[in-house]
Amino acid sequence: MQTQTDPYLDMQNRISGQIGALAEAVPHCALAQLVQRIDDIRCLARDHGFAAVETLASRLESAVARGDYRAAILTYLDAMSDAVQAPRGPMPAAMHEAWLASVATRLGH
């Protein structure tokens, strides 16, 4: 008996897996590798409708570019892990702001 899988759940699991793998690899990754892996997650999220994850990944890319990512990266990855579990469908702008505010709060900004 063949079971049909939900493409959304498959993508949700794939993105979650990439976020988790990056979190584990952070201490051992070179800067260029971090940037590439964050960008891969951002693009995957963008292409599959995970807007909150895309927004957080974009902000993390900016933090990395500024050079202040070491303290922030795990906080962003935690927020991205939470965001990937958000219900499917269009997300209001206020929800994006709430995810970003949660990161700022965790970082003490």
Image: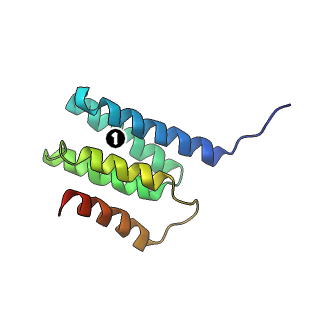
Residue drawn at x 35%, y 69% as measured from the top left: 97
Q: Is residue 28 above or below residue 91?
A: above
Residue 91 location, x and y as percent? 50, 67
Indicate the colouring scheme.
Answer: rainbow
Out of 107 and 50, give the one closest to the viewer.
107
Residue 95 location in percent, x, y?
Answer: 43, 69
> Measured along the vertical axis of the image, is residue 31 above or below residue 48?
above
**Rendered-image quadrant of the C terminus:** bottom left
Q: Measured from the top left, where is residue 60 in percent x and y?
A: 27, 49
Quadrant location of the N terminus? top right
**Residue, x 21% and y 33% (percent of image)?**
31
Residue 22: x and y in percent read: 35, 35
Residue at point 28% right, 54% down?
59
Point out the residue furthest to the left here.
67
Circle 1 sits in a helix, a strand or a loop, which is it? helix
Query: Residue at 47% across / 43% down in the picture?
Result: 44
The part of the image, by quadrant, that contains residue 13 is top right
Name which quarter of the figure residue 105 lies in.
Answer: bottom left
Is 14 on the left or on the right of 100, as rendered? right
Residue type at mark 1 is Ile
Residue identified by numbered label 1: 38
Left or right position of 48 against 33? right
From the viewer's perspective, tell me whether residue 88 is left or right of residue 67: right
**Tag count:** 1
Nearest the eye: 17 or 60: 17
Badge 1: residue crowd in 10 Å (few <14, some 14–19, many ≥20): many
